Structures are given as structure tokens and as C-alpha cells.
Amino acid sequence: MAEVLLITMVKSMIGRREKHRRVLRGMGLTKLGRTVELKDTPEIRGMIHKVSHLVKVEEKK
């Protein structure tokens, strides 16, 4: 597993469930197209799984 993940928001949170909005905000994603670097942990992987249809994930080497 990579140590750092690059997570980019590719779809808007407008019209999405409040749980999905909270997950995106928790990861630091507030605007469309914004990218954040987060450590690769089981907690972050779970958050990504919850909103996988809204984000793009890349492993940073």
C-alpha cells in the first residue's frame, strides 16, 4: 500500500446525502476539483469507499 493517497473530488455534493457530505468535509474536500493528500489508513479507506462515486483516488509514490 502507498503511504499517501491523493484524493480528488470529481462530482459535486449537491443533492447528496448528509452522511456523504460529512465524509467529504471530513477529508477536507469542499470544492469540486480540489485535491487533498491523506495518509493511507483503514479509516481513510473506509471514507473513500463510502463516497467512491464522488472522488478519484491515486497512490502517491
Image: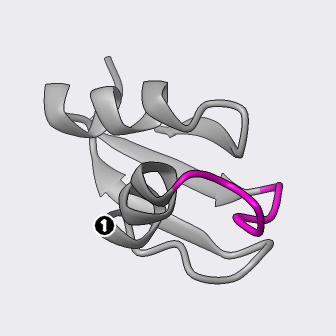
Coordinates of residue 8 in the picture (x, y in percent): 66, 57
Tell me if residue 44 is in the magenta stretch. Answer: no
| Residue at the (67%, 54%) spot, across then down | 16
- Side (left or right) of 33 relative to 1: right
Its colouring scheme is: one colour
Coordinates of residue 13 in the picture (x, y in percent): 70, 64
| Residue at the (76%, 69%) spot, across then down | 14
User: Which residue is outermost to the top?
Assistant: 1
- Which one is in front, 33 or 2? 33
Q: Could you say whether the residue bearing mark 1 is in a helix, strand or loop? A: helix
Q: Mark 1 points at which residue?
A: 26
- Position of residue 30 relative to residue 19, above or below, is below
- Side (left or right) of 48 relative to 55: left
Tell me if residue 16 is in the magenta stretch. Answer: yes
Packing grade of label 1 (10 A; few <14, some 14-19, many >=20) is few
- Which one is in front, 20 or 45? 20
Query: Residues in magenta?
Result: 10-17
Coordinates of residue 49 in the picture (x, y in percent): 46, 24
Query: Of helix, strand and loop, which mostly describes the magenta segment?
Result: loop
Answer with the quarter of the image where residue 45 lies.
top left
Residue type, numbered disc 1: Gly
